[in-house]
Image (cartoon, coloured by chain):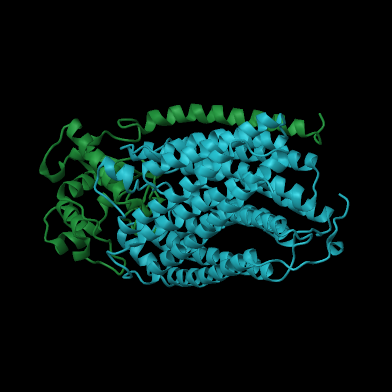
Chain colours: A green, B cyan
Amino acid sequence: MDIQDPSFWRAGAISTTLVMIVVLAFLSVDSMSVISVGGRNVPKYDVINHQIGYAYNWSRRADVPVIGGLEPLFGKTVTEAQATDLMRTGKLVIQSRACMDCHTIFGNGAYYGPDLTKSWLDPAWPQIWMPMTGKTTREDAMVEFLMHPDKYPTWSRQMPNLQLSEDEARATVAYLKWLSAIDTNGFPANFGQSGKQP
Amino acid sequence: MYRSQKLSLRYYTAAVALFGVMIVFGLLSALYYLYPAMLYNVFDFHMSKIMHIDTLVIWLLMGFLGAVYWYLPKELGIEVEGMWLAELMFWIFCVAVAIVALVFVFVQYGSANEFSMWFINQGRKYVEAPRWAAIGIVVVMAVFAYNVIATCIKARKMTGIMWVLVLDLIPLLAVYLDAFPAVTNMSVDLYWWWWLVHMWVESTWEVLIGCVMALVLMDVMGTSRRIVETWLYIEVMLVLGAGILGLGHHYFWIGTPQYWLGIGGFFSALEPLPLLGMVVHAIYDAGTHRMKTTNQPAFFWITAEAFGNFIGAGIWGFMMTLPQINLFSHGTQWTVSHGHFAFYGAYVCGIIAVLYVAKQQTSGVDMLAGRAWKWGFGLLNFGMVGMVMGLLLAGMAQAFYGRAIGGSTLMAFTSASENAWFVSGMWARLFFGFVFAAGYVVLVYDLLTAPKRVPVTRARLEPA
């Protein structure tokens, strides 16, 4: 073994790379089973028919989503197929309007606007936007805000009006509700707790 | 001069021009944080940011292409095969970039349908360019791969560096195919999107710049092939050994299994090792040649690349990569600080070094020295370090006040963004952004100015 011989390191580079690729392939197959819709961490799209919470789990030592009883979005229970269509539109809204070039989802994206991972659960909806928009439900306030963000300023950085139709806004709200039900290993921590960590 | 080197100069020119566009939109993006009402509903932050990061990706890519087209005939001793196709691709590439930029500035976004994905904006960070343009990049990269491989075959010669380069082209091309899908499930979407972003930026690009730096070191410092190839293999082993599973540090919070916290944390903590290796390599070479070289600017930029890569990508990355810290630092200006430092250290410095190599050869001077490059070097580095520190300050304020204390809600985000530390950091970033821009102006001036002829005896290389 001559460590000054380039061929020694070439063999090391090739073998290390191949081993790592194989390990990554196995981990990816397993991860896909967990993060596919209906997998262990990612609920089916029709979870939007249910109440969704986020609470500290002592055994996991992390905040986890809590799926509760029925609480249909916009007061209407949807089938799995209808929920899938809503999600497809919601995701296309998020891409076509480049939402993640201002916001983050799961902390990924840009950092000009707040993270949207748990935005469905944000206390600002009942505390600020429901009274501001005059809407009686969280989802209606969200739709109104998404369609006319320039009418409801809350601080100096204002969301631009991205010309969302009502259908697009409703699909986006559905998507955000579903997102909040994904188990993200405790990210973001202490959401809505303002320092009240257990 | 080979025909491919003339093409290389065109790529360098386009790259430097886009570097300038990137800086303009970077300054604009920085201004939104301090003057948020600016251009409201006309040209908002997200479009400015898209222009900033997409031009970054494209100019670096053009710099890489230019560097390889520059060195390929020198390395293999013959003209690059398929040059007419390569030249055609250059113009197609430039026209495509211009069309995408015009669409981003004037159209900006579309409705929630496939048409928007194909022709306006895909809305996926770093790869916002519509699908037709993404396919165009694949075609350009495929032609580039053909040029490299066909030239190797025609020359009937394969050096160690060329083997690494050719093998690196496979993942470079393959992972970019991941720029197209619009998967509904965000967890799955981000899982594969990170294959593209991480495998390009933290793996295949690192290997590519490693190949380019190996060629530059032989050219500028006369380092022996045996030494640079040994180091290149070590770097590849460590970069891919740590980097492939280091991908896991992007899988902490996207819905993926908990085991990624341990795997990602461990392997990404190892990622600074190859970058440290590059620093050792640079110091070793500089010491061997007693800091003497015939191309001072290139030598200093290579050294800056080694240190910048280690500190910006390695240390700054390590600082926030462990999941216990990342839970709070992820998605804040802390990440932006790391991103700026890493891209600059790992790639920008390397590309600038290659620009100076080309300048020396095209101007025909034995020794490239002078004063202006020092101002450019100083202002760019000072500006970048200042921006990075300002962003770090702002990011830490967000992590502490917005995340750890505030609980990550909209109001927590708002109050952290109005915190005095955050605002100070944003002002510092803007100020140093202008310093960086001044450095760019000097750099361009220096690159375009004919060098003074200095006797080479002062700089003759010591025998290695």
Q: Which of B224 and B419 is in front in this view?
A: B224
Quadrant in the picture for residue B443: bottom right
Answer left or right for B4 relative to B420.
right
Residue B201 in sight here = yes
In the image, residue B7 sits, relative to residue B20, either above or below, namely above
Residue A184 in sight here = no
Quadrant in the picture for residue B165: top right
Residue at 37%, 41% in the rendered image: B131
Could you say where residue A79 lies in the image, as x and y percent from the top left?
Answer: 16, 32
Could you say where residue A161 lies in the image, as x and y percent from the top left?
Answer: 23, 60
In the image, residue B159 sits, relative to residue B123, either above or below, namely above
Q: Which of B93 and B36 is in front in this view?
A: B93
Q: Nearer the viewer, residue B77 or B136?
A: B77
Answer left or right for B266 relative to B219.
left
Could you say where residue B379 lies in the image, as x and y percent from the top left?
Answer: 61, 69
Could you say where residue B16 lies in the image, as x and y percent from the top left?
Answer: 55, 58
Answer left or right for B340 relative to A17.
left
The total number of labels drawn is 0
In the image, residue A178 sits, relative to residue A40, either above or below, namely below
